[in-house]
Image (cartoon, rainbow, N blue to C red):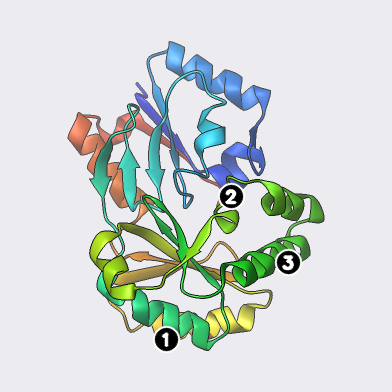
């Protein structure tokens, strides 16, 4: 018997950036009626899944930041593998050295070490070129999007002492600068870096992986591996 269904969001559950089809919503409701729970496993942060989980009739399990943090159905953090803060300055310097803008996702906001307006502008420009002008317009005008809430770090020492960092995301209109930055990041054995495309990189704790986070959660709540269904486009 399947007791838990966990789905990736982008290119899997979602048919648009923040939309779930009626067919999928009906299937999720059916699973709940049969006794199964449902959850998201995604690279997104809490703010970027809020409107999506609001489409469901029940609160989902959330595995966010590619496994950096796990929220149960009551909104409690029940697992965490945050970015090792001691590497933040070095990572952001590497990205900046290749002219790769970055956004730092934390449990209480979004930050950058450079000019927030420039980071947003280049993020929206990239979306317009690589996705669509419609999607770029959504991100440009939606006050809830991370790119519209960036705060520039003015005191790095204080920041790394107090913040819980989910991930650092770098991006560029062209793939070459991102690939060059990734080669330098390879020397950090406590960090993982993955890409959803050739033009971006997400840097996390090496242990922040969706599969590891899911394994940790089901062991915590007593669900066997063969009672879990995972949906992810490959």
99 vs 221: above or below:
below
Q: Which comes before the other along the chain, label 2 or label 3?
A: 3
Report which residue position mark 1 lands on.
Answer: 184
Q: Position of residue 218 (x, y in %)?
A: 25, 35
* Spatial CA span between label 2 and label 1: 29 Å
- Badge 2: how crowded within 10 Å, few (<14), some, or many (20+)? some
SS class of the residue under badge 2?
loop
Report which residue position mark 3 lands on.
Answer: 125
Q: Quadrant of residue 62?
A: top left
Q: Which comes before the other along the chain, label 3 or label 1?
A: 3
Marks 2/1 in contact by CB < 8 Å: the verdict is no
Q: Residue at x 71, y 61 (%)?
A: 127
SS class of the residue under badge 1?
helix
Q: Position of residue 126 (x, y in %)?
A: 70, 67
The total of numbered circles placed on residues is 3
* Spatial CA span between label 3 and label 1: 26 Å
Q: Position of residue 158 (x, y in %)?
A: 27, 69
Q: Which mark is residue 145?
A: 2
Q: Which comes before the other along the chain, label 2 or label 1?
A: 2
Q: Nearer the viewer, mark 2 or mark 1?
A: 2
Residue closest to the far front: 154
């Amino acid at each position: 018997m399947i007791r838990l269904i966990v789905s990736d969001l982008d290119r899997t559950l979602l048919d648009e950036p923040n939309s779930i089809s009626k067919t999928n919503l009906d299937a999720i409701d059916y699973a709940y009626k049969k006794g199964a729970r449902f959850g998201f496993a995604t690279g997104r942060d809490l703010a970027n899944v809020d409107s999506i989980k609001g489409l469901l009739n029940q609160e989902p399990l959330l595995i966010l930041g590619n496994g950096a943090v796990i929220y149960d159905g009551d909104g409690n953090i029940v697992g965490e593998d945050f970015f090792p803060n001691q590497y933040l300055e070095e990572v952001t310097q590497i990205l900046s050295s290749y002219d790769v803008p970055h956004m730092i996702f934390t449990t209480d906001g979004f930050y950058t070490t450079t000019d927030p307006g420039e980071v947003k502008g280049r993020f929206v420009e990239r979306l317009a070129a690589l996705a669509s002008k419609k999607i770029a317009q959504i991100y440009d005008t939606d006050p809830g999007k991370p790119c519209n809430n960036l705060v520039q770090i003015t005191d790095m020492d204080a920041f790394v002492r107090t913040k819980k960092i989910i991930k650092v995301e770098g991006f560029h209109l062209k793939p070459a600068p991102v690939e060059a930055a990734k080669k330098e990041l390879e020397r950090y054995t406590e960090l993982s870096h993955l890409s959803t495309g050739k033009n971006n990189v997400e840097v996390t704790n090496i242990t922040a992986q969706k599969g590891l986070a899911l394994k940790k959660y089901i062991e915590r709540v007593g669900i066997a591996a063969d009672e879990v269904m995972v949906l992810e486009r490959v």
